[in-house]
Amino acid sequence: MRDEKIYMIPVNDAFSVNCECAFCYLENNFEKQCIEIVLGESVMEVDARIETNKKGFCRRHFHMLLEQKNKLPYGLILETHLNEIKKHLEKLIYSNFSAATLQQKDGFIKKLLGNQNLNKNKLTDLIQYLENLSVQCVICERIQARMKNYFEVFFFMWKNQKDFQQKVLSSKGFCLHHFNELLKYSLNCLSGKELNNFAEKICKIELDNLSRIYTNVCDFNKQFDYRNANNTVTEEIRNSLLNATEKLGKYK
Ligand SMILES: [Zn+2]
Ligand SMILES: [Zn+2]
């Protein structure tokens, strides 16, 4: 638990925030930090970004990097990452072909199309490379590692601090993604009576809060009926679509 102690404060604080999911709040904050760290690393030496060059990012994080104000760090990341991909693809596409064939693109294409087996193997290798590339993301990996720490600390505090337990139980529950994660982690972190007690309480607050959101969305939709034109619409009802989206769709 020595290392995890530093995560107690952020996890405890997250459960004081009025939001639909404390884990989304934590993930969102850490994601912003990661973006800054990765951009900071990019202006350092090439050695410091070998991992980034090789793995790249998922679609979400490529776009988040693009949206940052300071463009040079991202430009440097793209320059080296593109070069890495280009070299790898060239190797995959042109391997097994003689240098002579390489010089004649027509010959290369004819040979590629003419040899069914070679063609298929080559495509399989290419697909494999692209598949690996598409599931790798330096930022997602760092977030995943940090979230593991947060979940472990959550259960440490749940077991040892009654006031934290109370805080969790008076929260608005979790988004469905983190609700699922929480249940999965509970299988490793708790057992016996403790596990049953946790599951029962957590499932209850999750259901209560889904009902709250459902009722608010229903009321939101009712305001479009002219018969309800004079009804007052509370802030909770006005925010219901956003809250429901956060409950169902993980963080933004
Ligand atoms: Zn969440
Ligand atoms: Zn990612």
Image (cartoon, rainbow, N blue to C red):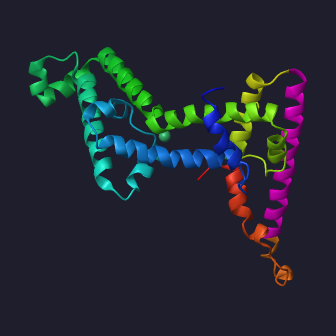
Q: Residue at x 81, y 77 (%)?
A: 225
Q: Nearer the viewer, residue 154 or 57?
A: 154
Side of 29 where 127 appears, left or right: left
Q: Nearer the viewer, residue 156 or 186?
A: 156
Side of 63 where 19 appears, left or right: right
Q: Residue at x 89, y 28 (%)?
A: 196
Q: Position of residue 122 (x, y in %)?
A: 32, 20
Asked whether 203 falls inside the magenta stretch, the response is yes
Q: Residue at x 32, y 42 (%)?
A: 42
Q: Is residue 204 visible?
A: yes
Above or below, 23 against 71 in this view is: above
Q: Is residue 250 visible?
A: no
Side of 70 where 194 appears, left or right: right
Side of 155 where 91 appears, left or right: left
Q: Which residues are magenta?
A: 192-220
Numbered marks: total:
0
Q: Residue at x 63, y 31 (%)?
A: 4
Q: Position of residue 170 (x, y in %)?
A: 84, 50
Q: Nearer the viewer, residue 132 or 205?
A: 205
Asked whether 208 falls inside the magenta stretch, the response is yes
Magenta residues, dominant SS class: helix
